[in-house]
């Protein structure tokens, strides 16, 4: 398990249409643990959780958590095309720093940045209250 900054890019099909592409995940990293692991095996499983809250039960054995989570699986691919790479990075920036989305990237930092896309094979959602 490794942390990452990512963004979800919706698929091209209608959101409610059966068989519509589920979209893709894009993320960036530098040379290191993630990129070495992806070279060995590009299969990824990503878990994203939100709204985790401890729920105290009547006894410690009945304690638990409420949460929302998404689990997705797919294969990661290093993005080599400069235009696709720029769009992926801008999607990540738009998620975390909307005001920075039109600012130019630092060329030195950009040269060290590896950008991946994950075409989603399966996606599931779970919620517990």
Image (cartoon, grey):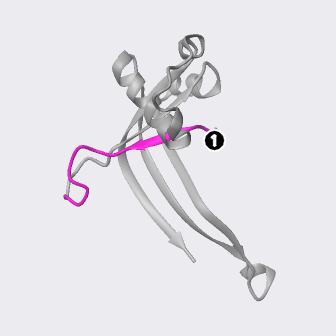
Q: Residue furthest bottom?
A: 58
Q: Residue at horizontal 52%, vertical 21%?
A: 114
Q: Is residue 76 visible?
A: no
Query: Where's residue 41, x and y in %?
Result: 49, 29
Q: Indicate the quadrant containing the N terminus: top left, top right, bottom left or bottom right.
A: top right
Few, some or many C-alpha atoms within 10 Å of disc 1 (few <14, some 14-19, many ≥20)? few
Q: Secondary structure at mark 1?
A: loop
In the shown orientation, is residue 62 left or right of residue 101? Answer: right
In the shown orientation, is residue 93 left or right of residue 18? Answer: right
Q: Residue at horizontal 48%, vertical 25%?
A: 115
Asked if residue 112 is among those painted magenta in the image, a careful observer would answer no
Relative to 49, residue 80 above or below: above
| Rendering quarter of residue 8 | top left
User: Across the whole image, how many numbered discs are drawn on residues?
Assistant: 1
Q: Which residue is mark 1?
A: 1
Relative to 72, residue 104 above or below: above
In the shown orientation, is residue 126 left or right of residue 63? Answer: left
Q: Nearer the viewer, residue 55 or 36?
A: 55
Query: Where's residue 59, x and y in %?
Result: 79, 85
Q: Nearer the viewer, residue 50 or 126?
A: 50
Q: Residue at horizontal 43%, vertical 45%?
A: 73
Asked if residue 4 is among those painted magenta in the image, a careful observer would answer yes
Secondary structure mostly taken by the magenta-highlighted segment of the chain: loop
Q: Is residue 125 visible?
A: yes
Query: Where's residue 94, x and y in %?
Result: 48, 39
Segment colored magenta: 3-17
Relative to 101, residue 124 above or below: below
Q: Residue at horizontal 56%, vertical 24%?
A: 35
Q: Indicate the quadrant containing the C terminus: top left, top right, bottom left or bottom right.
A: bottom right
Relative to 90, residue 8 above or below: below
Query: Where's residue 14, x and y in %?
Result: 21, 53
């Amino acid at each position: 398990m490794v942390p990452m900054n990512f963004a979800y890019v919706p698929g091209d099909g209608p959101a409610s249409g059966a068989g519509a592409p589920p979209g893709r995940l894009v993320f960036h990293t530098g040379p290191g643990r993630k990129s070495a692991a992806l070279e060995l095996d590009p299969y990824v499983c990503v878990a994203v959780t939100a709204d985790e809250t401890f729920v105290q039960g009547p006894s410690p054995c009945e304690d638990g958590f409420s949460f929302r989570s998404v689990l997705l699986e797919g294969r990661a691919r290093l993005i080599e095309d400069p235009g696709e790479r720029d769009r992926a990075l801008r999607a990540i920036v738009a998620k975390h720093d909307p005001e920075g989305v039109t600012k130019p990237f630092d060329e030195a930092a950009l040269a060290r940045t590896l950008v991946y896309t994950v075409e989603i094979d399966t996606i599931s959602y779970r919620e517990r209250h």
